[in-house]
Amino acid sequence: MLPTPDTSHVSFDTIYEPSEDSYLFLDTLSSASESKWLHERFQHDPSPVTTKPTPLVVEVGTGSGVVLGFVAAHAHEIFGRRDVLTLGTDVNRNACLATRETVVTAVQEAQRQQSSTGQSESDSDSGASKSRTPHISSLTADLCSPLRPGCVDVLLFNPPYVPTDDLPRLPSAEENQSAATESTSRSAKFESDSFFLSLTYAGGVDGMETTNRLLDAIPEVLEPSRGVAYVLLCKQNRPEEVMDRIHGWRGGWRAEIAGSSGMQAGWEKLVIVRIWRG
Amino acid sequence: MKVITANFVTCAVKECKTAQTSFPLHFHDAELEQQELDFQPEFIRNILPRVDWEALRVTANELGFPSIPESKPEGEALDNEQTLRDLHRLLLETHVAEGKLVCGNCGHQYMIKEGIANFLLPSHLV
């Protein structure tokens, strides 16, 4: 099993603490079947005729950054190449700061492990064997809103999926600045912390309001030929219906369950759906 | 925020997505930092196919990197180590720590603080 990134520097006052759903992401992406699928799509081929350019991996709603850090640190095991660019977005600026540290630390740690064990299996495969996966940025943003259409090769989303009566509004740019300062009163801080935490789990009707907005953005933001998205759903989100809907998108879209956990009365509690153009 | 980011982002305002002038966003008052990263020529060669060169030239100019080639290096030019080193430095080692990204279409300014750009919109633009 590949090591989980360290998130001990993260304050969970406003940031989602890595939980069963986060770990399902790590297990799914590094599973033998899924990494085989991803290798076929992204593995670097040194022949100059078929060069596959460096993939851009984007996680939306990074929280602590544990998922993106894992992917960055273990890009070679997951994609068959180390030259992967990572970018994260989150509506919470604190989460962006936390993510940057988690990813950078995870990559450094993986490098240290690699050099201390004298691992050399990949020294000949691409010439990029020692390179670090660069985390190009963490952006404070709503979902994929600042991303250029067609630029994302791998999109990861562990949404706020819990059905709730109300969907929390999006924070404003200014709110994020004041949330980062310490000068607020205790009750104001509590209110602000609760608001930011609610954004990590509260999904509105069927727990799908935010996920639906992300799904709508997928055809535009994914790279047209090799782009793939992984979206986590819980049972109350009705994954089968969501997948049927994706199959109905124009342009030959496919959706399959790539990983699941927590069987309850014959149903998986959580699933990760892979979405791509077949 | 590494400079290459500017090649992947655009204005968050929906109406700007289709406007050509919304890409690339323009750096204003940028404070740069250099963070050393192992130079891997293969890495730069693999990134280049996906770089929008015209946009990168605009960005490089705004950040005071005037020396990038007029057209994207191809063929033998990819064996020129100095060219690849210059690109490595610009794309992966140069960070924008403070400043703004400004949309050429709507004029909205996205603030960058401690290397984190803020793309959340004020409510009247959502």
Image: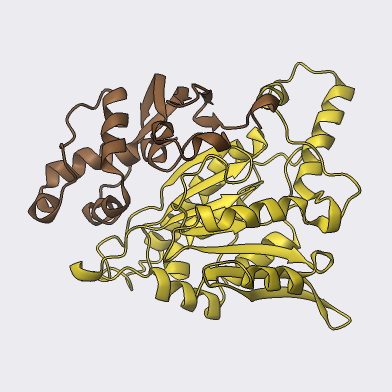
Residue A245: image location, x then y, percent: 69, 69
> Considering only vertical position in the picture, is A125 above or below B116?
below
Mark yes or no: residue B12 visible: no
Please name the colour scheme applied to the rendered image: by chain
Look at the image and tell me in which quarter the N terminus of chain B lies: top left
Label count reads 0
In the rendering, what colour is chain A? yellow
Q: Is residue A175 left or right of residue A276?
A: right
Look at the image and tell me in which quarter the C terminus of chain B lies: top right
> Considering only vertical position in the picture, is B22 above or below A36?
above
In the rendering, what colour is chain B? brown
Place residue A268 in its image quadrant: bottom right
> Considering only vertical position in the picture, is B64 above or below A101?
above
* Residue depicted at x 52% and y 68%: A251
- For the residue pair A122 and A204, the one nearer the viewer reads as A204
* Residue depicted at x 63% and y 71%: A248
Residue A52: image location, x then y, percent: 31, 65
> Considering only vertical position in the picture, is A51 above or below A222?
below
- For the residue pair A101 and A63, the one nearer the viewer reads as A63
Q: Is residue B11 left or right of residue B123?
A: left
Residue reaching furthest to the bottom: A266
* Residue depicted at x 62% and y 32%: B120
Q: Is residue B16 left or right of residue A23?
A: left
Mark yes or no: residue A19 visible: yes
Place residue B5 in its image quadrant: top left
* Residue depicted at x 24% and y 27%: B65
Residue A64: image location, x then y, percent: 65, 46
Residue reaching furthest to the left: B76
Residue A137: image location, x then y, percent: 48, 40
- For the residue pair B19 and B41, the one nearer the viewer reads as B19
